[in-house]
Image (cartoon, rainbow, N blue to C red):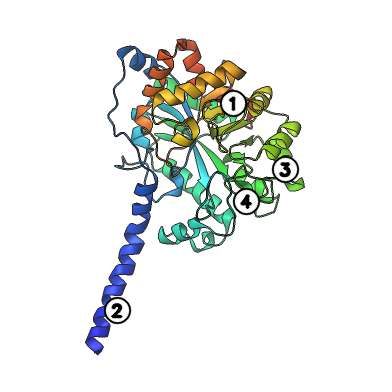
Amino acid sequence: MKRALLTAAGVLAVFVVALLLFAPAIVDRAANRVLNAPPYTTSADAEKLYRDLFVVDLHGDPLLWDRDINERLRHGAVDLPRLVEGNVAIQCFFIVSKSPYGQNIDRTEDDSDAITALAILQGWPRETWDSLLERALFQSEQLHRLAERSGGRLVVIQSKSDLRRYREARAQNTDVVGGILGVEGAQVLEGDINNVEKLFDAGVRIIAPTHFFDNDIGGSAHGVEKGGLTELGAQMIADMEARGILLDLAHASPALIRDALSIATRPVIVSHTGVKGTCDNNRNLSDEQLKGVAATGGVIGIGYWETAVCGKDAAAVARAIRYTVDLIGIDHVALGSDFDGAVPVPFDTTGLALIAEALLDDGFAEEEIRRIMGENAVRVFEQTLPE
């Protein structure tokens, strides 16, 4: 009996170790599916144009997962070798701090959290297990460490001068990628406005007030109350603008968007979204909201996943871009993939030439495609980043 108990304990120990080692990778692969594997084929004209573009992706979430993105991976959508191969000049890396179980685009409560288990299983520091701020600081540190180990291939951009130097370097060597840090949901402040400074010092240059649930900053489009901006939220926006942190209204409730646009004095973005004009659901923006963001001088990052564009290919992305351009003008549209954000996507980051080809097929001129694929986003960074 004693030997049997020891054997059972040994089996359990092996199971626990296996769970700790392999569960995060299994979850990563299941959550971040690429529907069509590379390589991708485009026309000669599209490929020639694409290779001459300065491409910016306003939203990706690879920092959440236990990966070394300096190495080429066989899963997910983003890593440094594929960013280089895909001619991506700037990738915005977003920090995810909390995801309730069963979250959905219509009504999500904040009474549970899947990231806690992921943090423990992935071996994050103990302080991250019960602190959303510490999770944000840990993920920001991860990007800086990745840049340090990249041999100069990844550069973290934190200021206008960083951006100027990076663009000069990029003009000489397209094997270098710029990274900008963002936060998805200001619940990471943990109710303390002073934590904006901590995030700024950690390199964060974009903050979205909400993610999938309401918080003490304001309402989410997917929350329970879906309320407007709170007093703390208004203080946060003022502090962000003073520091040069860009406001991102992705996932914000209509009331929060209205309130934020009424007090914003600098361009704002929506880093990853769809539009109701081509895909009508609670995740996507109305015409009024699109016009409001454009009025600040900001940009709309069109996503690639099905809930955003009601399709599973580059043509659906181009359709949403066409609608948005026709409504608010060519200067206010950008790309926002949501790569590795637990949504299936039609291609990985090596496939963005497919979007350029779809835009050409839709009748966009080359100069317009240059703006959409990156130059509009760069203009906003030049206007909002600190000196």
- Please report contact status of discs 1 and 2: CB closer than 8 Å, yes or no: no
- What is the spatial separation of the Cα atoms under label 2 and label 4, in whole angstroms? 40 Å
- Please report contact status of discs 3 and 2: CB closer than 8 Å, yes or no: no
Mark 4 secondary-structure assignment: helix
Residue 249 visible (yes or no):
yes
* Whole-percent x, y for residue 79 in the image: 37, 38
Comes first in the chain, label 3 or label 2: 2
Mark 3 secondary-structure assignment: loop
Comes first in the chain, label 1 or label 4: 4
Comes first in the chain, label 1 or label 2: 2
What amino acid is labelled 3 in the image? Leu
> Which numbered tag is attached to residue 229?
3
Q: Which residue is mark 1?
A: 299
| Residue 252 higher or lower than 381, as above or below | below
Q: Which residue is mark 2?
A: 9
What amino acid is labelled 1 in the image? Val
- Crowd class of label 2 (few under 14; some 14 to 19; many from 20; radius 10 Å): few
Comes first in the chain, label 4 or label 3: 4
* Whole-percent x, y for residue 149 in the image: 39, 43
Comes first in the chain, label 2 or label 4: 2
- What is the spatial separation of the Cα atoms under label 1 and label 4, in whole angstroms? 24 Å
- Please report contact status of discs 2 and 4: CB closer than 8 Å, yes or no: no
- Crowd class of label 1 (few under 14; some 14 to 19; many from 20; radius 10 Å): many
**Within the image, what quadrant is residue 46 found in?**
top left
* Whole-percent x, y for residue 224 in the image: 64, 50
- Please report contact status of discs 3 and 1: CB closer than 8 Å, yes or no: no
Q: Nearer the viewer, mark 4 or mark 3?
A: 3
| Residue 244 higher or lower than 114, as above or below | above
